[in-house]
Image (tube, rainbow, N blue to C red):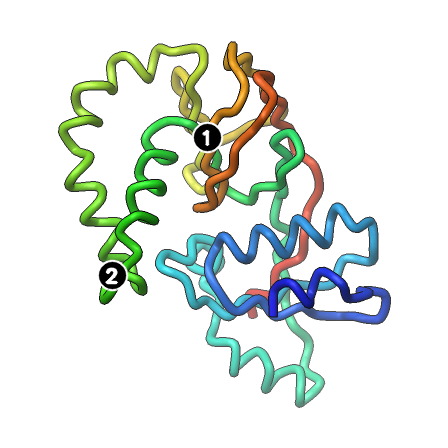
Amino acid sequence: NEHDFYNLSLKNVDYVIVSGGDGLLRRVIEYIIFSGQHKPKIIIDAQGSFNVIAKRYLIPKVNKVLIKIEKNEPLQTKAHDVYKLNEYVFLFSAGNMFDALHIHLSEILRIGFLSKGPLKYFISMILLLPVIILSTPFLIFSKKRFFIFTPVKGFNFLNFYSKINELKIDLKNGYNLIEIDGDLVILKDNLIDIKHLDTIDIVYK
């Protein structure tokens, strides 16, 4: 249970298995880092719609990892960069452009047979396509808009970023809807401060 996890001591924990999508993975890692406790290694049981981190590192099925632990075989890890956006942590994605609008509409479509799987995201993208085409020229030159996606290496253009050391943005007004790793959050502050925060070890073999 996600909420029960936040009350646990991590002192003697070697591994944390995260069974869910990128949003849950982000929230668990956020708790681990902000708790100031020992940082366990992360085992991903990919159950989300996209599982960006799991696909990036070609994470094996969780059963294969558990068998290696049972046999006392060594596990290989990758140190994944963790970033901070004001009071939140994110792992690969943040923004207030099409990503926030796309996630918001996708969550509205989370009903019936669309509640699971990626279909709702594809439908929302099709519905938003006219809006995206019409608004792109305004958004990409706006100093109040940004989109970060770190898996695409070495691509910084206008307000699109794949590599960041530190980024400060004045949104000019408070209570802004921001997308971070597929989660939607509301920032009360008009000033956004983004920077590299830490690393977390993710098991990939």
Tag 1 secondary structure:
strand
Q: Residue furthest bottom?
A: 71
| Residue at (45% x, 63% y) in the render | 58
Decide which of 161, 93 is in the foreground and name it.
93
Residue 141 drawn at (x, y percent):
35, 11
Looking at numbered disc 2 in the image, what kind of residue is underneath it? Leu
The answer to whether residue 4 is left or right of residue 182 is right
From the viewer's perspective, tell me whether residue 16 is left or right of residue 167: right
- Which residue shows up at 48% across the image and 35% down it? 94
Quarter of the picture holding the N terminus: bottom right
Question: Which part of the image, by quadrant, shows the C terminus?
Answer: bottom right
The disc labelled 1 sits on which kind of residue?
A: Leu
Q: Residue at x 52, y 33 (%)?
A: 186
Give how far across and how far down residue 118 sits, in percent. 28, 57
Is residue 127 shown above or below 19?
above
User: What label does residue 114 carry, if any?
Assistant: 2
Question: Residue 182, how many percent across, how many down?
Answer: 44, 46
Nearer the observer, 54 or 205: 54
SS for dot 2: helix
Sequence order check: which comes first, mark 2 or mark 1? 2
Above or below, 188 relative to 54: above
**What residue would you read off at disc 1?**
177
Q: Position of residue 135 (x, y in %)?
A: 23, 19
Quick check: 90 above or below 77? above
Q: How many angstroms separate mark 2 from mark 1 (CA)? A: 23 Å
Left or right placement of residue 202 versus residue 186 in this view: right
